[in-house]
Amino acid sequence: MTDAAQLPTITPMARRFRGYLPVVVDVETGGFDWNRHALLEIAVVPIDLDEAGELILGDTASAHLIPAPGTEIDPKSLEITGIVLDHPFRFAKAERDALDHVFAPVRAALKKHGCQRAILVGHNAHFDLNFLNAAVARTGHKRNPFHPFSVFDTVSLAGVAYGQTVLARAVQAAGMEWNAEDAHSAVYDTEQTARLFCKIVNAWPRPAG
């Protein structure tokens, strides 16, 4: 007979999303083609729960990346993001090191909540997931905590909740502030997307059980 003390504890977060942990991700890149263009910035925010069971932001982890060998950068993308590749305070990491840096807190959050996999939350989420998967493939990384194709997309959620699909407009429709000068920073966009995700999901009735 199995000792009840040995059975895994099903946490509220694991119960809420079928064993998946939502982790908000934003990437800044050297273009739109994930097979060709460089990954330049990545930020992640694991979603946590407060004492009342409401979704809240966990701690942000981020990294600037050295463009991987063989990848390209469209100069127009740098005009949009404002990234200065040779900035002395950029402190960019090699692609494998950057992935290790942001994956570590995701795995810690998975362990905390007893979840099986992380599920990427993003605004146009498959764009971020495709660049992430491309970096994982280039580096041969074997400990990617993210589901390879499933996502939660705040474009769809915000479209249903507020009738807005542009991130800045959706955030404002949700009653939050948007600073255009900080946009196109992976950290800022990730944290704003995370706040948007939490607000929408918290407003939805929780499933029974």
Image: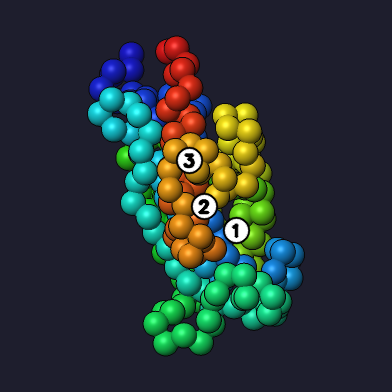
Mark 3 — residue? Answer: 196
Residue at image x 62%, y 29%?
160
Mark 2 — residue? Answer: 25
Q: Is residue 168 above or below residue 141?
A: above
Closest to the camera, between mark 1 and mark 3, is 3
Name the element at disc 2: strand
Say which amino acid is labelled 1. Leu
Compared across the picture, whether 56 is left or right of 66 comes to left
Residue 90 lies in quadrant: bottom left
CA distance separating discs 2 and 1: 9 Å
Residue 101 lies in quadrant: bottom left
Name the element at disc 1: helix
Residue 111 visible, this angle: no
Closest to the camera, between mark 2 and mark 1, is 2
Mark 1 — residue? Answer: 132
Q: Are marks 2 and 1 in contact (CB under 8 Å)?
A: yes
Residue at image x 64%, y 81%?
69
CA distance separating discs 3 and 2: 13 Å
Quarter of the image with the N terminus in it: top left
Q: Which mark is residue 145?
A: none
Q: x, y percentage for residue 141?
A: 55, 62
